[in-house]
Image: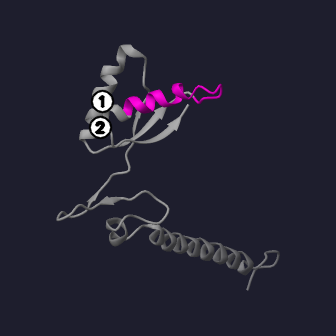
Amino acid sequence: MSEPGQQPLTGLYLRLGVVVGLVVAASLAGYWLGAQSVPTEEQRVLGGVSGGAPSAVATAGQPARVIPPLYFFTSVPSAGARSAVADEISMASSAGIHQYAVSVPFPWDGDMNAFLEPLNFVVGVDPSAQFMVGS
């Protein structure tokens, strides 16, 4: 029994139990959903999850190799420093990185050459280049 003038704590304990139960349920749901979002080894080897870029490349007679989701970010400068950028692009290409994030001026005035010239420069150094462009 409670003393006179004090309220029983059962309501507080009940609320605290509900909050703890909700936290535990949310944690378990998070762990389960997180495990569902990770692709299995079979999905990684067969080309990734639908909607994404292939994460493995298989060639005849060789096992599939996993391609890391890496990008090489570059800004193609004017003529002076292009040789240094070309060397870095060729190093990235030889390391297996063929995805590039390139800063380009968008052709708001209709000059497509200003947009395509940095991309053509990268393709000239790495013919397997894929791009993510930005300004």
Q: Does residue 108 belong to the magenta stretch?
A: yes
Say whether residue 17 is left or right of residue 101: right
Q: Residue at x 46, y 34 (%)?
A: 102
x and y, in percent, of residue 40 in the image: 37, 71
Q: Vertically, is 2 above or below 40?
A: below
> Mark 2: which secondary structure?
helix
Contact between labelled residues 2 and 1, with CB atoms less than 8 Å apart = yes
**Mainly helix, strand or loop, the magenta region?**
helix
Question: What residue is shown at x 26% (from left), y 62% (from top)?
Answer: 58
Identify the residue position indicated by label 1 in the image: 88
Residue kind at label 2, given as amino acid type: Ala
Q: Give, as a single range, the part of the protein colored magenta.
A: 106-122
Residue 120 in the image: x percent, y percent?
A: 41, 31
CA gap, disc 1 to disc 2? 6 Å
Q: Which residue is label 2 attached to?
A: 92
Q: Position of residue 135 (x, y in %)?
A: 56, 31
Q: Is residue 39 left or right of residue 45?
A: right
Q: Eyeballing the image, is 67 above or below 61?
A: above
> In the rendered view, does 122 fall on the left or right side of 50?
left
Q: Write down the quadrant of residue 100 in the picture.
A: top left
The quarter holding residue 73 reads top left
Choose between 126 and 44: the one closer to the eye.
126
